[in-house]
Image (cartoon, rainbow, N blue to C red):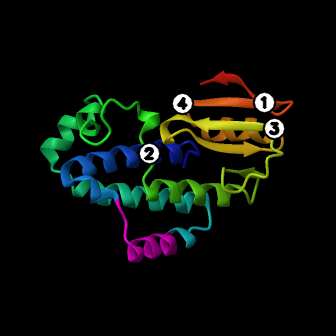
Amino acid sequence: MEERTFFDKLYEFKKYQLMQERLKWQNAVLMDKAQIERENEILSNCNTLRELTESLKEHIAEIKREIPEDILEEWIYSDYETYTDMYHHRCFWNEIENSMLVVMFLTTFRALYDKCVCISDDETADGDEPYNVRLYDFNDYDFYFKREEDMNAFIQKFSPEPCSVFEKHNGCWYELYFM
């Protein structure tokens, strides 16, 4: 399995969730306590990034089955505003909030990847991390790194495009590049 698959699949999942939201009203992507507990259990059973990506693929297949085929064919190649405009009027893709499940996938990814490389997000960062990768497609979700080598390895391994890469100098973040 190619490492880049996780963020590509997560993008696809977010896209299908937004389609589902449009079809089944806004509460289609909301989760009750029992659903949150069930998803937490599923994700906590993922011990590798490969298992997490496979779980994501299963979630995609499940959500795609709920979208009528004719609508899916029309929307899959259309502009995202076709299915997001009702609840996210004139929002750019990065301004659309992540669903709780997308955030759960991102935090599980961070926890699994943190076993190999010191990585943190807004919930776990201690403020001393001088490097940041901001994931545009996921409501500007941030990953922080203590070492530039770790950040570069993450970018090279997962290619989370589009993203912005920042470095902190004297307490201020400076964008190094956008990809």
- Write down the region rendered in magenta: 30-42
Q: Can you identify the residue that label 1 sits on?
A: 172
Circles 3 and 1: CB atoms closer than 8 Å: no
Query: Mark 1 falls on what kind of element?
Result: strand
Nearest to N terminus: mark 4 or mark 3: 3
Circle 1 crowding by C-alpha within 10 Å: few under 14, some 14–19, many from 20: few
Q: CA distance from mark 4 to mark 3?
A: 20 Å
Circles 3 and 2: CB atoms closer than 8 Å: no
Query: Mark 4 falls on what kind of element?
Result: loop
Quadrant of the rendering where the C terminus is positioned: top right
Query: Mark 3 falls on what kind of element?
Result: loop
Quick one: 37 or 173, which is closer to the camera?
173
Which disc number belongs to residue 130? 3
Quick one: 4 or 98, which is closer to the camera?
98
Residue drawn 39% across the image and 61% down it = 58
Identify the amino acid type marked 2.
Glu
Residue drawn 80% across the image and 43% down it = 129
Nearest to N terminus: mark 2 or mark 1: 2
Q: Can you identify the residue that label 2 sits on?
A: 97
